[in-house]
Image (cartoon, rainbow, N blue to C red):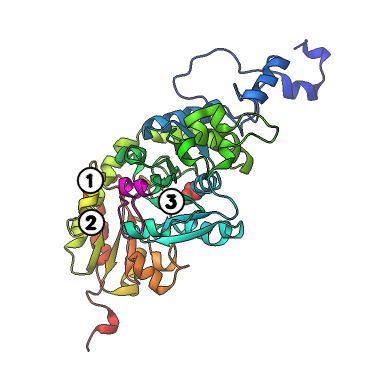
Amino acid sequence: MAANADIGFSTRQVHAGSATAHASPRATPIYLTAGFTFDSLDASAEHFGTGTGFGYTRTGNPTIQAVEERLACLEGGDQAVLVSSGQAAVTVALLALAGAGDHVVVSEHIYEGTRGLLLDNLARLGIETTFVPTGDLAAWRDAITPRTRALFAETLSNARNDVLDIAAVSAIGRERGIPLVVDSTFTTPYLLRPLEHGAAVVVHSASKFLAGQGAVLGGVIVDDGRFDAAASGHLFPHLVQTDRLGGASFAERHGARARGAYIRESAAPRFGPSPSPLNAFLIGQGIETLSLRVERQSQNALAVARWLEQRPEVERVDHVGLESHPDFDLGRRYLTRGAGSVFTVTLRGGLEAARHVVQSVELITHMTHLGDVRSLVLHPQSTSHSARTVEERRRAGVSPGTIRLSIGIEDIDDLLADLEQALVGVPVVERETVVL
Ligand SMILES: *Cc1c(COP(=O)(O)O)cnc(C)c1O
């Protein structure tokens, strides 16, 4: 830039100074920039033509890319696309597969945001959902129609800690060329890698365990890079047909990576839930300690679950690491490193017992969120599961006395002491049934 005297103040305030020097930072730099300069007209044309290099942060950013590469590697996937929230990850993944007139088969035990998305929002776009019990393989198979474009479930569900038999459900889809999309938020790639068991696409709310400290929202979609145009092309014409100008299809350009490429180049940037590079940086930082946190959280959670199971105030603990859990064997098969930190406890004393506990904990925080380094508690019936009928809640394992815990990394003795003091005064039978 020319000498200060020759350049106006307003020009200098936006052009003076530059951080493009070649330095070699060890931590991932935060490229908090909307766009990137082009070296030449050919470079800009090349970028718009083939997507090489960086042009605009919605289609690519070095900080975001670093986190995507890390997550693809941890999941054993081919490529990952980071988006602004877990909800965005689910939305983009499903809209990359299904369109108006299509159909998806979904486990009935899923996150309420996803359930609402399917029932209210995607339904309005003409995408129909059939809900099935997670473990009923015949129901999954029977629900598939010629319009089915995806099977969707969570690896480990809230509230009942149901375990998805990924190998079995993905095999049912594969027979018909239909991908299984798995929300692995509760299990993280440290505990379970669904792509290794046959899932085609994994999504996460990165706001939870991946970021880990409850500061940012984020989501990720990881594709396995195994799109088979011969087996599935007829279901996904947008991947195999020539583009709008008659150019090569995604499958022609990207082969088995066609679905991932479509998510990256078309679905995510067009629907537009781009993550901030700053949030991407914080998610990337969080992931660096994922194994340490989740290992400790899993140990703590199992210890808390075992302790609660022995308490007279407690009717039931739904933690898949307990021998009493119906999916204990399935859990042993899929969750060899631990079962995560989110589970529910149902108190004999019903709603008033639950109210007492969530209002009496001192160390444990009463809030909606999970996967945090801090332990959290929530009352599902009146919050996360309030949009369900009594019967739907019963099927999900939520009764008035149910509370959900997300256990953090605190010292186990302090967590047990907090729960012990919170249980003081909690009735051991439901008040209505007390005979006076
Ligand atoms: C939180 C959550 C989501 C939604 O993620 P956000 O980051 O809050 O948008 C989706 N699925 C599961 C299982 C979750 O726990």
What's the amino acid at mark 1? Arg
Q: Residue at x 31, y 57 (%)?
A: 135
Crowding near pointer 2: few (<14 within 10 Å), some, many (20+)? many
Q: Is residue 87 left or right of residue 413?
A: right
For the record, the magenta segment spans: 156-172
Q: Position of residue 319 (x, y in %)?
A: 25, 56
- Contact between labelled residues 1 and 2, with CB atoms less than 8 Å apart: no
Which one is nearer the viewer's eye here, 98 or 371? 98
SS at mark 2 in the image? helix
Distance from disc 2 to disc 1, alpha carbons, whole Å, reads 20 Å
Split into 4 quadrants, where in the image is the C terminus?
bottom left
Q: Position of residue 426 (x, y in %)?
A: 26, 71
Name which quarter of the figure residue 419 lies in: bottom left
Which one is nearer the viewer's eye here, 398 or 436? 398
Q: Which residue is mark 2?
A: 305
Between disc 2 and disc 3, whose residue precedes?
3
What's the amino acid at mark 3? Leu
Name which quarter of the figure residue 133 lies in: bottom left
Crowding near pointer 3: few (<14 within 10 Å), some, many (20+)? many
SS at mark 1 in the image? helix
Membership of 157 in magenta stretch = yes
Q: Which residue is mark 3?
A: 151
Between disc 1 and disc 3, whose residue precedes?
3
Which one is nearer the viewer's eye here, 303 or 182? 182
Distance from disc 1 to disc 3, alpha carbons, whole Å, reads 21 Å
